C-alpha cells in the first residue's frame, strides 16, 4: 500500500514533466541548435542509380514525427523546416506523434488514404510494418555508393528489407542502457558493486546492490514496468543480459524467450524484494519515479534522458533533488553486455502522387545525405548513423557543447556494446504486446515457464503469418 500511494502521488506531481524517448513525449536538446542554410542536396559520386532531377519549388509536404529526442519539439524542428524551404522552395508541415497512440493515428490515416508524405521513426515500424505491407516508397534510387560507404552497416541493414528495398533512410542511432541514482547507491553502500570506469556490473553485483538498497530504503527500488509497450526495450535488455539469454534467433525468423537463461532471469527478478513487477507503469512512468527519487534505478534510459535537464529541473543527469544519475550497461554474468539499439530515420509514404514523392525524396537527401544531417542529429541528442557525410566528419558535432563530454563518455562505454537489431523480426508489433502481457501475468503470480510458453507461442504465430 505504501508503494502504491507514493507512486500515485508522484505520478500526479510529475504530469508536468516532459520526457525523452521510452514511450513519452521528448524534450529538446541543450544549447543553441539553429540550422544553417547550406543549399540543397547534390548528387553524390559513385551512384549507379541517378535520381530524377529535384522537383520544382512550391510543393507542400506533411511530415509526421515520433518524439525522437528533440524531434518531439516544434521549437527544435521548425528552424530546420524553414531552412529547407529557403533552400528548395518546398514547404514541410510537421505534426508530432506520441508513442502512446502514434501507431493508431498512422494506421487510421493509412486506412483513410490520408497518410502523411514523410514519417520519422525506426525500422521496426517503417521497414517490418508499413514498408513490408507496401505502404512506403523504396528509396534505393537515392542511396549512392558514397552513402553506402559512410552509413553504419548495421543501421543500413536494419533499414533495408530482405528483398533489398530501402524503406528508411537512417539519420541517428543510440544504444539503450540503464540509469542509476548514484547518491542513493552510495548511501546504501551499493556503489561497491559498480565498475564506474567502464559503467558495467555483474549480475551478482546487481542482485547485491538491490539487496543493499532495499535494506536501506525498505521499499521498491526498481520496477519491471509492464503497463504497455512503452520503454519495453529496457525490460527485454535486462532479462536477456542477466544470464545471457536471447530475444530472437540470429536470422530474425522466430522469437526465443523460452531460452532457459531468460527463464532464470525472470525467476530471479520475481524473487527479489525491492523489484516490483508493476502493471501500472510504462517506461516513461518509471523515469518519472526515478527523477522523483522513488525508484533508485531505471531500465528505460539512454543519452537523450542523460542530456535533458528540463525533465528534472536541476540540470542534465540529475534527479529532482540534484542527485547524480549515472548511465550503466545492463548487468551480465559474462562481462559482455549486449545493448538494444535505437535507429531513427525518414520514410516516404506512397500516396500515389509522384510529384510529392519526388519532393519527399529531395527532403530525405537534404536531411540525411548532406551536411544538413548535423542539425537533425544535434536536435535528436543521439549519435550519427554515419560518421561522415560527403567526407564531412559528423563525429565531432557535439564537441564544445554542454553535452560534448557526456556524448564522448557514452560513445566510449555504452555505444560499443550495441547488439543485434532484432526489432526487424516479423510479427514485431504483436510480439511486443505478448511481452508486456506476459510480464503482467508473471507479476500476478503465474508460473514463469508456463507464461513464457503461452506468449512466446502467440508471438511466433504472428511471426509465421
Image (cartoon, helix red, strand yellow):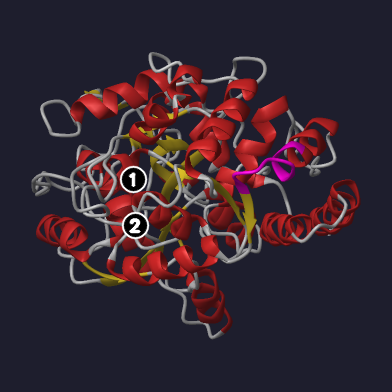
Depicted 192 relative to depicted 179: above or below: above
Q: In which quadrant of the rendered view does residue 225 lie?
A: bottom right
- Give whichever of 78, 29 is nearer the camera: 29
- Residue position marked by numbered label 2 in the rendering: 19
Answer with mark 2 or mark 1, whichever residue precedes in sequence.
2
Q: Residues within 10 Å of mark 2 (few under 14, many from 20)?
A: many
- The alpha-carbon separation of the residues under discs 2 and 1 comes to 7 Å
Q: In which quadrant of the rendered view does residue 457 lie?
A: bottom right
Indicate which disc residue 388 carries. none
Residue stretch in magenta: 268-275
Q: Is residue 26 magenta?
A: no
Q: Quadrant of the C terminus?
A: bottom right
- Residue position marked by numbered label 1 in the rendering: 305
Image coordinates of residue 68 in percent, x first then y, are: 37, 53
Which residue appears at 49% of the width and 77% of the height?
105
**Mark 2 and mark 1 residues within 8 Å of each other at the beta carbon:** yes
Q: Residues within 10 Å of mark 1 (few under 14, many from 20)?
A: many
SS at badge 2: loop
Depicted 81 relative to depicted 395: above or below: below
Which residue appears at 40% of the width and 69% of the height?
9
Which residue appears at 49% of the width and 74% of the height?
352
Image coordinates of residue 360 in percent, x first then y, are: 34, 61
SS at badge 1: helix
- Give whichever of 372, 59 is nearer the camera: 372
Image coordinates of residue 259 in percent, x first then y, are: 83, 35
Residue 338 visible to the viewer: no
Amino acid at each position: 500500500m505504501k508503494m502504491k500511494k507514493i507512486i500515485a502521488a508522484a505520478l500526479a506531481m510529475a504530469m508536468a514533466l516532459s520526457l525523452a524517448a521510452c514511450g513519452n513525449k521528448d524534450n529538446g536538446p541543450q544549447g543553441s541548435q539553429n540550422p544553417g542554410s547550406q543549399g540543397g542536396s547534390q548528387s553524390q559520386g559513385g551512384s549507379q542509380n541517378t535520381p530524377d532531377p529535384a522537383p520544382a519549388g512550391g510543393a507542400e509536404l506533411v511530415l509526421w514525427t515520433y518524439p525522437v529526442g528533440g524531434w518531439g519539439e516544434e521549437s527544435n524542428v521548425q528552424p530546420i523546416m524553414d531552412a529547407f524551404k529557403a533552400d528548395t522552395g518546398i514547404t514541410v508541415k510537421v505534426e508530432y506523434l506520441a508513442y502512446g497512440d502514434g501507431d493508431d493515428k498512422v494506421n487510421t490515416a493509412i486506412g483513410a488514404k490520408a497518410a502523411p508524405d514523410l514519417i520519422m521513426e525506426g525500422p521496426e515500424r517503417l521497414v517490418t510494418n508499413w514498408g513490408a505491407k507496401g505502404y512506403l516508397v523504396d528509396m534505393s534510387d537515392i542511396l549512392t555508393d558514397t552513402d553506402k560507404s559512410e552509413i553504419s552497416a548495421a543501421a543500413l541493414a536494419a533499414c533495408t528489407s530482405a528483398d533489398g528495398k530501402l524503406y528508411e533512410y537512417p539519420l541517428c542511432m543510440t544504444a539503450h542502457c540503464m540509469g542509476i541514482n548514484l547518491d542513493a547507491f552510495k548511501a546504501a553502500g551499493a556503489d561497491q558493486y559498480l565498475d564506474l570506469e567502464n559503467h558495467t556490473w555483474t549480475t551478482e553485483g546487481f542482485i547485491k546492490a538491490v539487496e543493499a538498497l532495499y535494506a536501506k530504503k525498505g521499499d521498491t527500488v526498481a520496477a519491471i514496468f509492464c503497463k504497455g509497450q512503452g520503454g519495453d526495450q529496457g525490460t527485454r535488455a535486462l532479462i536477456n543480459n542477466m544470464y545471457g539469454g536471447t530475444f530472437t534467433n540470429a536470422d530474425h525468423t522466430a522469437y526465443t524467450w523460452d531460452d532457459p537463461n531468460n527463464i532464470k532471469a525472470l525467476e530471479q527478478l520475481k524473487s527479489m524484494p525491492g523489484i516490483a513487477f508493476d502493471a501500472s507503469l510504462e517506461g516513461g512512468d518509471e523515469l518519472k519515479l526515478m527523477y522523483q527519487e522513488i525508484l533508485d534505478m531505471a531500465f528505460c534510459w539512454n543519452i537523450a534522458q542523460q542530456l535533458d535537464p528540463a525533465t528534472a529541473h536541476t540540470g542534465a543527469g540529475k534527479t529532482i533533488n540534484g542527485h547524480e544519475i549515472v548511465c550503466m550497461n545492463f548487468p551480465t554474468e559474462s562481462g559482455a553486455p549486449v545493448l538494444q539499439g535505437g535507429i531513427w530515420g525518414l520514410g516516404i509514404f506512397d500516396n500515389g502522387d509522384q510529384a510529392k514523392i519526388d519532393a519527399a525524396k529531395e527532403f530525405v537527401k537534404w536531411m540525411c545525405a548532406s551536411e544538413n544531417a548535423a542539425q537533425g542529429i544535434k536536435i535528436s541528442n543521439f549519435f550519427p548513423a554515419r560518421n561522415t557525410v560527403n567526407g564531412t566528419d559528423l563525429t565531432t558535432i557535439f564537441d564544445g557543447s554542454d553535452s560534448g563530454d557526456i556524448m564522448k563518455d557514452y560513445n566510449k562505454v555504452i555505444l560499443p556494446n550495441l547488439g543485434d537489431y532484432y526489432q526487424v523480426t516479423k510479427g514485431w508489433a504483436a510480439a511486443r504486446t505478448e511481452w508486456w502481457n506476459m510480464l503482467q501475468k508473471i507479476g500476478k503470480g503465474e508460473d514463469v515457464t508456463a507464461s513464457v510458453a503461452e506468449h512466446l507461442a502467440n508471438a511466433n504465430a504472428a511471426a509465421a503469418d
